[in-house]
Image (cartoon, helix red, strand yellow):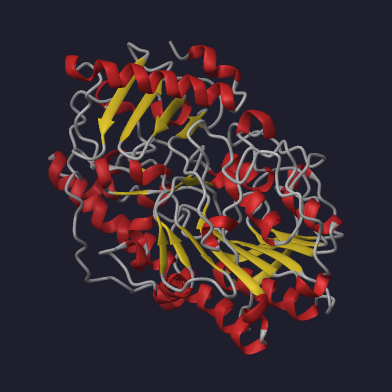
């Protein structure tokens, strides 16, 4: 069955202090008549790094369908996740609020389904709402007329889906009805089936949330031999030694990041091929990992194409906004890493492409935008008032060519995965706070080994983030200015942890 609507995560620019350029008080417009409101489809991948998308300059894989979306819409070059990990990012997407306010800081935090979300506000304004695919927020989905979601992380083959009307139970981690087939295809099947059965005459918002290309990297049977003989180009810092930077003192305790320490069961065969030579072992693991990861990206792109084709053939494309995004960025060998979490560029930059009827084909925007901005953007595009307590900003002005003040700095706060800090997986459990401008980045590790630890990068001179300038005497004035901005952003977003920044 072919697909139909798509929307991915959006983000909007703000003024210097982090105030919404479109106004913190939100869009005051009254809801438009139903016939005039656009349909919205949000396609969200999981762990899709921009380095694996053609229109973002990938040297690794072709993604003709995502690229098609970019040719017909606007691609954002500086979109970022405010907490680069699954559940917290998804909670921010739904609420337009930082994690200390929406209540999901770590992977094991349960989302409070009673709180305000953009699907609820759309529902109240007459939209039909649905979500299909990954949920991963424990509480039962609210604000949706229909949901069909994975229990927990789900699985790639013959996965059960929990649907509206079925018992939730066990935090949504068990139960559901098994759908035969490959998960990426099945999610699209169910989403398109809902589109075909929805009530006509009402606008809709459909969230299509894929598990791909999240691990385990189990490919579709049609792709099991894809890239079998491919040798992928290596990033220039694949063999990074981390000298003078945060990973250096904990290099042997970050197994959730380094290829040579990959703990995932699927990749334990790495160890059998290792020689003890760090360069050889990293290069071997990189090639093997990329083959599996990119097989999942290929299936994901095919299913984006199914959605685009459905929209065209059904006539919905003329009235549907389509967005493509990922819940976070991902490392594909940069710094010798896989995974996300770190505030280095590849880990917290997200793909963001938005196609809207009557928009500017092939446009590229370089404003600093964020996952925080998806909720207000969708509401604004739907003609629904944006509540004043939403912290993100609508991207609609950027999409329609309206000049607005630009955000000059972006605030990041990663709390760790679960549990308390220990020595087994440093990046998995330890906090990171930071601030990025257009040209510089300040990163703070409050509870790092022998810390706290700071990093400061000049992104103009050092885009690969290989030289920590934090202790350079000639940089102290700008570093102190950035510290002030970091504290100001934390206060602006009402983060109680701002007091940690000294």
**Res 150 → quadrant:** bottom right
In the picture shown, does residue 55 fall above or below 213? below
x and y, in percent, of residue 341 in the image: 43, 37
- From the viewer's side, name the closer residue of 422 and 86: 86
- From the viewer's side, name the closer residue of 264 and 195: 195
Left or right: residue 292 compared with residue 183: left
Placement of the N terminus among the 4 image quadrants = bottom right
Seen from this angle, which residue lies furthest bottom?
313
**Res 464 → quadrant:** top left
> Which residue occupies 73% across, 51% down?
118
Placement of the C terminus among the 4 image quadrants = top left
Residue 457 in view here? yes
x and y, in percent, of residue 51 in the image: 33, 57
- From the viewer's side, name the closer residue of 121 and 132: 121
Left or right: residue 401 compared with residue 318: left
- From the viewer's side, name the closer residue of 464 and 438: 438
Q: So how many labels did they put on this image? A: 0
In the picture shown, does residue 497 fall above or below 358? above
Seen from this angle, which residue lies furthest front?
403
x and y, in percent, of residue 266 in the image: 40, 52
x and y, in percent, of residue 13 in the image: 51, 46
In the picture shown, does residue 312 fall above or below 249? below
Residue 2 in view here? no
In the picture shown, does residue 134 fall above or below 414? below
> Which residue occupies 70% across, 44% down?
26
């Amino acid at each position: 069955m072919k697909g139909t609507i798509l929307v991915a995560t959006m983000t909007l620019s703000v003024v210097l202090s982090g105030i919404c350029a479109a106004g913190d008080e939100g869009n005051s417009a009254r809801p438009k008549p139903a016939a005039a409101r656009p349909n919205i489809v949000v396609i969200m991948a999981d762990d899709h790094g921009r380095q694996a998308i053609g229109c973002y300059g990938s040297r690794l894989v072709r993604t003709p369908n995502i690229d098609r979306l970019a040719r017909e819409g606007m691609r954002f070059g500086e979109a970022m996740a405010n907490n680069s990990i699954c559940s917290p990012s998804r909670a921010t997407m739904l609420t337009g609020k930082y994690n200390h306010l929406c209540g999901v800081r770590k992977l094991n935090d349960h989302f409070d389904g009673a709180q305000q979300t953009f699907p609820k506000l759309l529902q109240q304004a007459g939209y039909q709402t649905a979500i299909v695919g990954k949920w991963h927020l424990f509480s039962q989905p609210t604000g949706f007329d229909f949901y069909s979601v994975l229990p927990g992380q789900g699985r790639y083959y013959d996965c059960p889906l929990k649907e509206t009307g079925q018992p939730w139970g066990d935090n949504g981690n068990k139960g559901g009805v098994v759908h035969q087939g490959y998960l990426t295809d099945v999610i699209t099947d169910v989403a398109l089936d809902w589109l075909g059965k929805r009530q006509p005459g009402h606008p809709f918002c459909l969230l299509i949330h894929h598990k791909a290309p999240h691990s385990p990297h189990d490919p579709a049977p049609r792709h099991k031999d894809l890239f079998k003989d491919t040798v992928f180009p290596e990033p220039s810092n694949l063999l990074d030694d981390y000298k003078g930077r945060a990973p250096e003192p904990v290099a042997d305790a970050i197994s959730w990041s380094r290829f040579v320490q990959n703990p995932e069961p699927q990749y334990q065969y790495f160890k059998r091929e290792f020689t003890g030579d760090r360069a050889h072992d990293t290069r071997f693991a990189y090639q093997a990992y990329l083959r599996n990861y990119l097989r999942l990206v290929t299936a994901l792109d095919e299913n984006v194409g199914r959605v685009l084709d459905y929209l065209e053939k059904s006539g919905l494309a003329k009235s549907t906004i389509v967005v493509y995004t990922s819940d976070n960025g991902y490392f594909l060998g940069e710094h010798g890493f896989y995974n996300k979490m770190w505030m280095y560029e590849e880990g917290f930059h997200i793909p963001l492409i938005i196609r809207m009827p009557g928009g500017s084909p092939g446009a590229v925007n370089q404003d600093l935008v964020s996952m925080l901005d998806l909720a207000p953007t969708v509401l604004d595009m739907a003609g629904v008032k944006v509540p004043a307590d939403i912290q993100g900003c609508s991207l609609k002005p950027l999409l329609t060519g309206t000049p607005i003040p630009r955000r000059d700095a972006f605030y990041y706060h990663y709390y760790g995965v679960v549990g308390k800090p220990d020595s087994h997986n440093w990046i998995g459990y330890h906090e990171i706070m930071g601030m990025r401008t257009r040209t510089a980045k300040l990163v703070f590790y409050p509870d790092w080994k022998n810390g706290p630890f700071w990093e400061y990068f000049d992104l103009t001179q050092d885009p690969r983030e290989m030289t920590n300038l934090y202790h350079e005497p000639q940089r102290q004035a700008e570093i102190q200015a950035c510290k002030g901005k970091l504290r100001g952003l934390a206060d602006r977003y009402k983060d109680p942890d701002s007091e940690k920044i000294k």
